Image: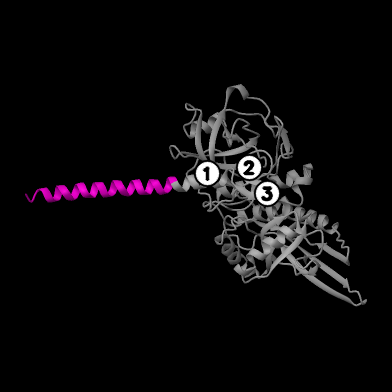
Amino acid sequence: MNLSKPHLSAVALAIFLSSGALILNGCQSTAVEQLAQQSHGAKAGDGYTYGTGPNKTKPYPQSEPVNINDVGGATPRFEAPSRGGNSDYKVLGQSYLVWTNCNSYQEVGTASWYGPGFHGNKTSNGELYDQKGYTAAHKNLPLPSYLKVTNLENGRAVIVRVNDRGPFHGSRIIDLSEGAAKAIDMTKKGTARVKLELINTRLNNTTTEGGSGQAVAQTVAAGVIGNIIESNTTSTTRNNLQKLGDYLSERKNNGEVSDSTKAAAIGAGLYFAGKIGSALSEMSAESNSSSNSTSLRSTPSSSVTRTVTTTTTTNDGTSTTQQVVDTTSFAPVNNNQANYEVSYATPTAPLADVSSGKAVPLSSGAYVQLFSSSTLEGATKFKNNIRNTTKYQVVIMPEDNLFRVRLGPVPEADAYDALEQMRAAGYVDAFIKHL
């Protein structure tokens, strides 16, 4: 009789372990299903929907760094946007937006693949399609972009370089090259349920790389991508981008960088600093109710110093002048922070809060952007809903014909904490913007 006790214990243990595995798998499945619903087709505000597709779409932001340890396929590297394929376009009567400067994106949906019939044809960015390579077509991502693609049916993953547009069949979210499709074992079936994760080569959002080599890419990304690359495709610009790419590749492959490569990279950095300074110095500000001037100067470094003078005249003729001097670094405040959008820009008008209907001058610095509206009424409604959820000042700033709702200015030391608090409160699209 005593022999039955160990037997019963073993059976009970087996049942417990099995039920635990079912619960764990159920949790994982639920998480995937939630991400699928949120990242593809869910409402994103102002008429936008999340996920790849036609009309007004936007990328669903990543919730954690991308793990690319031991994942094969394409080798992610910093690249300038392609000269072709990066403008909004129409296909089969549908309009598609290109997610310019996208740096955080994930999505769950159906993948397909294309092969022999397209081999050797030109892709949307002008390259020749290689069916054996690790490339992909996507409707909205900038070209080129790098993605980690995970087959949720078998757990296999591959890194692909997006250089083409599509697929335009049903609700599929990506078309893989034959080589990439084979890597995740989906060629026989033809389609697979996958998870896409952006590997941001402009900012470090992976769990495998960091250090001074990455800082070079960060400097270029934050200070150049938004201001220079998209409007400047001269051979000199491309050559200098290549020098920075050589620096990163040499450091990654060899662990060390030659003096000549270092010198070339430093020269390239100075070139872009000068270009940015020149571009910023041409910007001026105008205001209907005040007289404003913006003075900018370029220095041979990765920063730009600007002086913003705002003069406001009241009805009784009294004038009030405020002057702010600010030096903005192009590198993110904390290079070890992963998966945060940090935007650096000089506005085309003096910083002002228009919450009261009048322009109230603001200081330069770090802001946490939460929401954008095409109307002051919409922005004001959003502001009133969140003003009691944070200790920081909530302001409405007009920019690019939109009204941006932001927290700030926030002390640099507190910026990432403020961002985390707002994301935890449900504002997952929040990001840091330096002005």
Q: Is residue 314 above or below residue 212?
A: below
Report which quarter residue 163 is drawn in.
top right
Residue 206 pos. (x, y %): 54, 51
Query: Quick one: SS at disc 1?
Result: helix
- Residues packed near mark 1 inside 10 Å, few (<14), some (14 to 19) or many (20 plus): some
Read off the residue under disc 3: 244
Look at the image and tell me whether residue 201 can be seen.
no
Query: Quick one: SS at disc 3?
Result: helix
Does the magenta-highlighted stretch encompass residue 28?
yes
Q: CA distance from mark 1 to mark 2?
A: 21 Å
Read off the residue under disc 2: 145
Between 133 and 153, the one lying in front of the other is 153
In this rendering, which labeled residue sits more in front, label 3 or label 1? 1
| Among the two numbered marks 1 and 2 on one chain, the one whose residue lies closer to the N terminus | 1
Residue 27 pos. (x, y %): 41, 49
Residue 36: numbered disc: 1
Between 45 and 92, the one lying in front of the other is 45
Does the magenta-highlighted stretch encompass residue 213?
no
Q: Amino acid at mark 2?
A: Ser
Q: What segment is highlighted magenta in the picture?
A: 1-29
Query: Quick one: SS at disc 2?
Result: strand
Q: Residue at x 32, y 49 (%)?
A: 20
Q: Amino acid at mark 3?
A: Leu
Q: Residue furthest right?
A: 317
Q: CA distance from mark 2 to mark 3?
A: 17 Å
Q: Are marks 2 and 3 in contact (CB under 8 Å)?
A: no
Residue 263 pos. (x, y %): 70, 53
| Among the two numbered marks 3 and 1 on one chain, the one whose residue lies closer to the N terminus | 1
Q: Is residue 357 above or below residue 221?
A: below
